Image (spheres, rainbow, N blue to C red):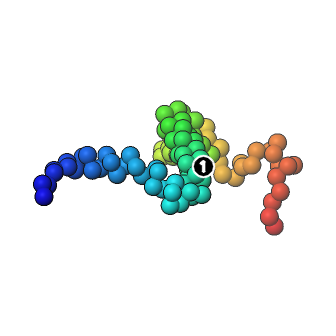
Amino acid sequence: MIKYHVSRSARLWAYWSTLPHRMLKKYPEQTIFYATFGVATLLIGGYKMKKYLTESDKPFYRGYYDVVRSNDPIAQNWRKPEEYPAPYLLSSVETAH
């Protein structure tokens, strides 16, 4: 019997090229579900990560803090914690007492 050498890359290519067909035959519902919602989630997540990492807009939180001395002119213009919330918001803010 003659042994034929099949390279590792050829076997790897054959495995990955037949994987979708094998998964559809063995797990049809899960494969279709992942192919639609899983791929869409990855695309949306990738888009949002690219947007938030490359643009200056931060998502919903502050991504950095400024540490300055108390006598720094920049810090003297900042509001003190006692001044929050702003007076025009007091009527709409409910406090937990």
Question: Which residue occupies the extreme top position in the image?
Answer: 55
Q: Which residue is mark 1?
A: 37
Relative depth, front residue between 40 and 28? 28
Q: Is residue 96 above or below residue 79?
A: below
Mark 1 crowd level (few <14, some 14–19, many ≥20, 10 Å Cα): few
- Quadrant in which residue 22 is drawn: bottom left
Q: Is residue 49 left or right of residue 89?
A: left
96 or 38: which is nearer to us? Answer: 38
In the figure, is residue 17 to the left or right of 34?
left
In this orientation, does residue 73 appear?
A: no
At 57% from the left and 35% from the top, the residue drawn is 57
Residue 7 image offset from top left, x and y in percent: 19, 48
Residue lying furthest bottom: 97
Q: What's under tag 1, amino acid-wise?
A: Phe
Front-most of residues 30 and 45:
30
Q: Residue at x 54, y 38 (%)?
A: 47
The N terminus - image quarter: bottom left
Residue 45 versus residue 71: which sits nearer the camera?
Answer: 45
Considering the image in quadrants, where does the C terminus appear?
Answer: bottom right
- Identity of the residue furthest to the right in this view: 91
For label 1, the SS is helix
Q: Residue at x 40, y 49 (%)?
A: 18
Seen at 66% across and 51% down, the residue is: 81
Residue 82 percent coordinates (x, y): 70, 52
Q: Where is residue 42 shown, x and y percent of the image?
A: 53, 46
